[in-house]
Amino acid sequence: MKLSEVKLVLEESKTIGFELPDGKLVPPHFHITEVGKVTKHFIDCGGTVRKEEMVNLQLWNANDYDHRLHPEKFLKIIKLSEEVLELENAEIEVEYQGSTIQKFGLDFNGRNFLLTTKHTDCLAKDNCGIPDEKQKVRLSDLNEEPCCSPDGNCC
């Protein structure tokens, strides 16, 4: 989900909820403790230099039960961050404290923001020597005729 999409959702929302991948909700008294611009400058295993930018949101579950973040306040935080940090309309990454700091993608289901799992991937599959995945064939789909017979001179 991109920053512009988050802003559109917040403009139409009366409440904010974040749902973890297991379906549990982040406690409603969470705080947004950081909005950041993260630049990742790296080289992939194929030797290509790459640069990615994303907007990072950090959610924090405090023992502050008297305060709830409302959509208009969250929107003000984002707009200030856009001005001060010169944020682009980049993909959102969310940090949330589980057993360790976890990083999630972000989506919206019409009611809650969804914290989605992220996965690693090779960005240079055509360059790094990993063989293509073998095609799986069911034995029942093979010809019933043997490809070789004892008198066929193939052995």
Image (cartoon, rainbow, N blue to C red):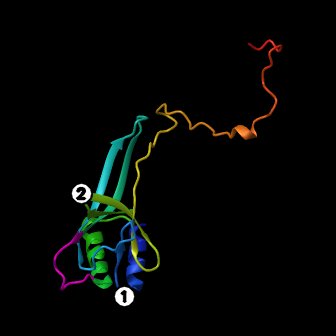
As measured in the structure, the alpha-carbon distance from the residue carrying label 2 to the one carrying label 1 is 31 Å
**Dot 1: within a 10 Å radius of its alpha carbon, few (fewer than 14), some, or many (20 or more) residues?**
few
- The quadrant in which the N terminus is found is bottom left
The image quarter in which residue 82 lies: bottom left
- Mark sitting on residue 43: none
Please determine whether, in this image, residue 37 is positioned above or below residue 17.
Answer: above
Q: Position of residue 67 (x, y in %)?
A: 20, 84
Q: In the image shown, does 120 or 55 lie closer to the viewer?
A: 120
In the figure, is residue 73 to the left or right of 144? left
Q: Position of residue 58 (x, y in %)?
A: 26, 66
- In the image, 44 versus 112, the foreground residue is 112
Amino acid type, mark 1: Lys
Q: Residue at x 46, y 79 (%)?
A: 110
Q: Report the residue at 35% width, 72% height from top.
A: 24
Nearest-to-viewer mark from 2 and 1: 2
Residue named by callout 2: 100
**Majority secondary structure of the magenta segment?**
loop
132 vs 54, nearest the viewer: 132
Q: Which residue is labeled 1 in the image?
A: 14
Give the image location of residue 125, x and y in percent: 49, 38
In the rendered view, does 130 fall on the left or right side of 97? Answer: right
Query: Of helix, strand and loop, which one carries label 1?
Result: loop
SS type, badge 2: loop
Mark 2, residues whose alpha carbon is within 10 Å: few (<14), some, or many (≥20)? few
Is residue 27 depicted above or below 148 in this figure?
A: below
Q: Which residues are magenta?
A: 60-69
The answer to whether residue 19 is magenta is no
**Residue type, numbered disc 2:** Thr
Name the side, left or right, on which 62 lies relative to 76.
left
Where is residue 80 shown, x and y percent of the image? 26, 74
| Image point (78%, 20%), residue name | 148
